[in-house]
Structure formats: C-alpha cells, structure tokens
Image (tube, grey):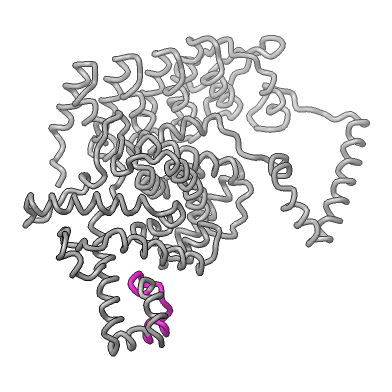
Amino acid sequence: MAGESLNRIDDTVLVREAQRGDRAAFEDLVRRYDQAVLRLALRLTGSEHEAQDIYQEAFLKAYRNVGSFRFECSFYTWIYRIVTNLCLDHLRRKQVRKEDAGVVVNADGEEFSVIEQTADDRPNANPERDLLRRELGSQIGRALEKLTPRERMVFELKHYHGLKLRTVGEMLNTTEETAKNTLFRATQKLRGALSGVRSGGDVRGGDAARRGQAI
Amino acid sequence: MKCEWVQQNIMLHVYDELADDARYELDQHVARCEACAAELAAAQEFRQTMATVTVVEPSPYLLTSSRMRLQEALETAQQGGFWTRLTFDPGIWLRQVRFSPALAAMLLLVGFGGGTAVTFRAMKGGTTEVPGQGAGVNAGTMTEDANITGIRSITPEPGTNRVNIKYDTVNTKETAGSLNDTRIQQLLLFAAQNNTNSGVRVDSVDLLKQRMNDSRVREALVYALRYDNNPGVRLKALEGLGSYVKDDVRVRDAVLETLTNDANPGLRTEALRVLEPVHADASVRATLERLAAKDSNKFIREQSRAQLAQLPELD
C-alpha cells in the first residue's frame, strides 16, 4: 500500500514535469504502465499489430493532452481510460466484422492461438489433459466473443487484470454500481455459454451435461 | 436475506467485491440454504474455469519495438498548448474564472500592467546582450539562436579543451571558448542536429562525446544515431553512447534499433559489440534471438548466436 501511494506521488511529479514539456518525464511514465497497456490491448485485440497500434495511439493521445490532465484521478486510471476507450472502439468494429478472435496474428503475420500460448507446464501434465485444456480455452474464447464490448471490457478488467470495480467504473466513466451490473450480466452470459464445462477441462456431453449442474 | 438477493450478489462475493457486512450476511445465509450453497459452489467453479486461460504477457520484442515506434512518433508530436486547450475546452477556463473572481481580477490587472510596461520599454528602446561574448544563457543568445543558419567550421585547439566555432547568422561570425562554456555547448548541439555539412556534424559529435553526462548531449547523440544520414556521424554518436547502454534505457533502445535496422553493416557490428555488457537484458536477448534466427547478414547471425551461447539458459 505504501509502495502504491509512493508510486502515485512519483507519478504526480512526473506528470507535472511532462506538463512543463519534459519528454523524458513522460517517457518514464510510459515505461511504468506500457507493459500493462500492451497486455490489455493484446488480449482484447488478439493481434500484436493492432495491440501495437492501440499502444501507440493511447500514449500519443496522452502526450498531446497531458497538459489538460487535472489530477482528478490517478495517471494510471487516466491512461487506462484512454486505452479502454480505444479497445472498446476496436471491439465494436470487430463485432461488425465478426473476426475469429481465438487467433492472434504476430508482427510477422504468422497466426497462432491465444490458448496454445498458455502451455500446461505442470509436472504431472499429460497430452490428453493439455488437449482438453485447449478445447476448454477455445470454448472460453468463443463465449467471451458473445459478450457486448462493454461487458467484455468489465469482465477482462475484473477477472484477468484483477482491478476493483470502483476503478473499472472510473476508467469507463461510469459508476461502480453500473460496473457491478455489467459484471453480473457478463458472468450470467458466460455461465450460460459454458454450461456443461468443468474447470478440469472436461467437456460433458449429452445426458451427462444435462444431468450436471450448470456452472 | 432473500435467496433472490443472494443469487444476484453471489458473483460479487466470488470476486471479492461485497462490503464486509453484506459478505457476512451472505455467508450466514449460504450456511443454512442448500440451493444458495450450490449456487455459490457453481459460481466459484465458474471463476476457476475462467482462470484456465491465463493472460499472455507481451513478448520483450513486441514491447521494445512498441517503445521504439512510440519514441519516434514522440519526436514529432506536439503537446497541446495553452491555445489548443482553450480552443478545445473553453469550459475549463470559464469555470475557473467563474469560481475565482479574485483571480480573474488579478489576471486583468497583471495583463494591463504588463501591457503598459512593454509599451513603455518599447518606446524607450530596450538593450540587448551582445552575442558571442560570454558564457551565460540569456535572452540575447536565445534570440540569436533563432538566427543561426549554419555552422561553418569547428576547430579544437590542440592540448586544451578550447574550441573555435565559425558560424553563420546573416554574416559569418566566430566565437571561441572552453567546452564547459554553455554558449559553445549550444553551438555544438546545434551543429550536431541541424548542419548540412556532415564533416561539421562529425566534429561536433566527436567533441560532444566528452560531455556525455549531460542528458541534452545524450539526447542529441541518440538523435544523430537514429536519424543522421552520414554513417560517420552515426558511428561517432554510437562511440559516445556506448558507455551508457547499461544506465540509460533510451540509449539502449537506440542502439538496439541501430543493430536491427541500420543500413550500414559496420555500424550494426559495432552496435552488437556495444550491447555486449547488457546482452542478458530481456529486450537485447529477444533481439539477438531474432537476429540469430533470420538476419540476412551472415556475420550478424553468427555473432548473435555467439553472444546467445554465452548467456545462461532461461528457466
């Protein structure tokens, strides 16, 4: 906690220097948050190339507008707000195009699955379980695709990035209550889409699935 | 507490978003309600299922290349200034003035006073500093900087740290001084970045190498390394920056960019040598792996492999 508030104080100093036109201070701010920004963009776009574009656009926007940053929230929240807006735009466009999101395209144009990137390296891992895990991963990917952009964003920020819903609300320019409702809707949809699937990677079929309790 | 409320808030419980009193009540209810207990178990299993897919960290190469691209764009990007902000968000300023009548009155008085003083000074005839005489950075030298059209020559005095610089404004002028002289440093920085004569740029970068602890000098040399079209200038800049690859990440990124993209194979080889002390760094390692796998230059490929071979295996 102490480290967090110290970070925030440092941020304030750096932001003030950046507002005076100190580019090195702005670049220090970039280095504090750019990995998290790139991670979020990569996860939501599913493409290294597009994630890089969002990264670039977000920080350039921040640089051009840092002068109007008024310390009403943390710099971290502010930069995330810019990134989430860009990602939401991207998701909306993507929904129109209905792309296959389970596949990531790297900088060299090669395609690979997001799920396959998370290989099971546990000591007792076996190929069969790994295969089931990948299958489960694909199902999760498809279920996430069915969410609205806003539901997807709230769920990603909460589940995969571990942010508090109050912060998520601030980032999305809404209230904590609305973020809670959005999370509720997202989880309901996901549970519906993944009914009959268990965390061990088993995909129950037919009667077994009907008998089993939906997660 | 009703089951309906529990069902609606169970996910917030699972994601640790319930207030302490609500959490306590929910736990109490679940302990005596079988249906809600089953719902809680299902919600927890859902969270566990979703955690099967972990978040992929961006590769060091992707991160480094994104940073390089951003740095390049920042070179030309402009921050929104006073007028831009006023143009785009006049509401902010209006709110300030509305809520601070004293401040507004003071601004008005300062504006009026300032205007009167400037007019008075203009009528009286202001004095300006004679340029090229001394060391200080002042309004006179700043005004003159805007008039410098080019540096004609740079001649170091052997055995001293003094230097003669011939430069053009409307006419050619000449000034001499020590490398510690701010005015001399400004002219050298100007020469390193703006001159059309590459020989002069080589001389200025070579002299600036002696003042690498100054961040403005490092910035000028990074600029020269990345953008100068003369390989000699880039090589001098690389020589100067070499000792900073460990401590200054921007220098490291610029040298990595040279290693990856420079058109001159000699410079790339030199960049490879310069990066040797930091080859264990994640971004350097990722670049070396890439070059070792598919660089078009055989020597660079082999050298990258040789450096990678010296590194310990990653777990």
B209 versus A81 height, above or below: above
**Quarter of the N terminus of chain B within the rendering:** bottom left
Q: Position of residue A209 (x, y in %)?
A: 19, 64
Q: What residue is at 45 percent from the left and 41 percent from the top?
A: A96
Q: Position of residue A135 (x, y in %)?
A: 19, 50
**Which of the 4 image quadrants contains residue B35?**
bottom left
Q: Position of residue A189 (x, y in %)?
A: 36, 61
Q: Is residue B20 magenta?
A: yes
Q: How many marks?
A: 0
Q: What residue is at 89 percent from the left and 31 percent from the top?
A: B122
* Segment tinted magenta in the rendering: B13-25
Q: What residue is at 33 percent from the left and 60 percent from the top?
A: A190
Question: Magenta-highlighted stretch: main secondary structure?
Answer: helix
Q: Is residue A69 magenta?
A: no
Q: Nearer the viewer, residue B46 or B231?
A: B46
Q: Is residue A72 left or right of residue A119?
A: right
Q: Is residue B251 left or right of residue A21?
A: left
Q: Nearer the viewer, residue B126 or B79?
A: B79
Q: Position of residue B300 (x, y in %)?
A: 22, 20
Q: Nearer the viewer, residue B190 or B283?
A: B283
Q: What residue is at 35 percent from the left and 15 percent from the top?
A: B263
